[in-house]
Amino acid sequence: MARHVEVIDVALPIEEAFATVADFARTADWDPGVVSSKATTKAPLRKGSRFRVEVGLLGRTATYGYAITEFEPPSRVVLHGGDGHMQLFDEITLVSRGRGTRITWEVRCELSGIGRLANPLLDLALPVIVRRGAEGLRRYARTVVMRDHSAKRGRKRAAKGRKNGERVARGHRAGAATAAEPITVPVTEGAVS
């Protein structure tokens, strides 16, 4: 059995990080090795939720079914997947760390039948595949944080603009000059210009 563990620090609150990694219907959003992913059971996410995940591997696409076998929001989820030739086990644990979350992602993969002859190759490939997924998750989390930060700044600017607009409107009602109204300054005779 091949096994690889990645530790991923993300600047997401634990609840949001858990929602991202526990819902395997979202893996195509962050794992570059996943071609498509979808839930095959209805919400809400829970023990027993099932997914169909298509993975690109060596120029081919393989389809795996996954199911949540242990579900402990927001700190742990275990998924079991595979097909007739390969069994996959993903155990994902999450711990709050300051303003972010530390995710520990353990993947175990076991080939069956004649496929076991490829175990030495799998021992080499699995770390590469999991590292790519971990890096994709890091990039995805940075994008979410930047998007949320930009949206928050946009809301602040809009609120500030509304306040400034109210000040201009109040100033105009109070008789303040605007660009459309010329200001006249009286000139006295004999004044030096």
Image (spheres, rainbow, N blue to C red):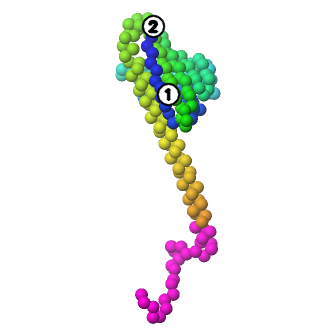
Q: Position of residue 29 (x, y in %)?
A: 48, 32
Task: Please tell me which residue is depicted at 53% across the width and 25% down the height of the picture.
Answer: 24
What residue sits right under mark 2 in the picture? Answer: 112
Magenta stretch contains residue 185: yes
What residue sits right under mark 1 in the picture? Answer: 27
Packing grade of label 2 (10 A; few <14, some 14-19, many >=20) is some
Q: Position of residue 105 (x, y in %)?
A: 50, 23
Labels 2 and 1: the sequence-earlier one = 1
Q: Position of residue 49 (x, y in %)?
A: 60, 22
The Cα atoms of the two marked residues, 2 and 1, are separated by 25 Å
Q: In front: 103, or 162? A: 103
Residue type beneath disc 2: Ser
Task: Please tell me which residue is depicted at 62% across the width and 74% down the height of the picture.
Answer: 174
Task: Please tell me which residue is depicted at 41% across the width and 22% down the height of the picture.
Answer: 129
Q: In front: 122, or 63? A: 122
Task: Please tell me which residue is depicted at 62% across the width and 69% down the height of the picture.
Answer: 170
In this picture, which residue range is highlighted in magenta? 168-193
Instruction: Look at the image and tell me in which quarter the C terminus lies.
Output: bottom left
Using the rendered image of the protein, determine whether residue 39 is visible from the camera's viewpoint. Answer: no
Q: In screen coordinates, is 23 left or right of 30?
A: right
Q: Position of residue 164 (x, y in %)?
A: 57, 62
Instruction: Look at the image and tell me in which quarter the N terminus lies.
Output: top left
